[in-house]
């Protein structure tokens, strides 16, 4: 990549970021809702809650033919629990902890873990 290409892509990135709100530009991991104008935000730590899924303990080695199928079941179960809790408790948005950090957001990990176990019975 020569210098002109670098400048071209750099300018496109800066212009694109200028049209996003600051929170949207920073938010990499949003599990439910939209960050913009969130009045009742919450957060989870995905690496913590995913281990509570029964599918997590069933994951074979990565090169096993069933790995992706079981991984998808685990992720679907966890994401469904996040959505269920958000809707039941009235949260506008659920993000990964500190991605972005939103003032006043609440930890809903314990509630989501309970919901995962309830849904997977």
Image (cartoon, rainbow, N blue to C red):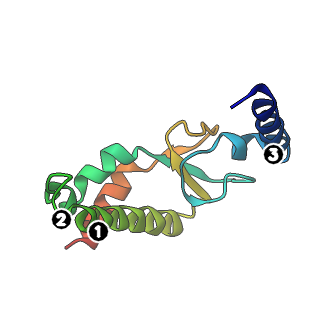
- The image quadrant of residue 104 is top right
Q: Nearer the viewer, residue 106 or 83?
A: 83
Q: Nearer the viewer, residue 61 or 82?
A: 61
- Looking at the rendered structure, the secondary structure element under dot 3 is helix
Residue 59 at x, y percent in the picture: 17, 57
Numbered disc in front, either 2 or 1: 2
How many numbered discs, if any? 3
Residue 118 at x, y percent in the picture: 26, 69
- Looking at the rendered structure, the secondary structure element under dot 2 is loop
Instruction: Say if 5 sits above or below 56 in the image.
Output: above
Numbered disc in front, either 2 or 3: 2
The residue beneath circle 2 is 65
Q: Which tag, 2 or 3, sits closer to the chain's start?
A: 3
The residue beneath circle 1 is 73
Q: Which tag, 2 or 1, sits closer to the chain's start?
A: 2
The residue beneath circle 3 is 16
């Amino acid at each position: 990549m020569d210098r002109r290409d670098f400048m071209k892509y750099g300018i496109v990135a800066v212009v694109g970021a200028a049209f996003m709100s600051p929170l949207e530009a920073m938010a990499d991991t949003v599990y439910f809702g939209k960050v913009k104008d969130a009045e009742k935000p919450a957060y989870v730590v995905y690496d913590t809650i995913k281990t509570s899924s029964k599918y997590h303990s069933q994951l074979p080695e990565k090169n096993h033919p069933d790995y992706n199928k079981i991984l998808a079941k685990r992720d679907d179960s966890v994401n469904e629990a996040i959505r269920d809790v958000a809707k039941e408790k009235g949260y506008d948005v659920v993000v990964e902890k500190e991605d972005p950090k939103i003032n006043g957001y609440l930890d809903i990990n314990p509630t989501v873990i309970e919901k995962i176990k309830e849904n997977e019975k």
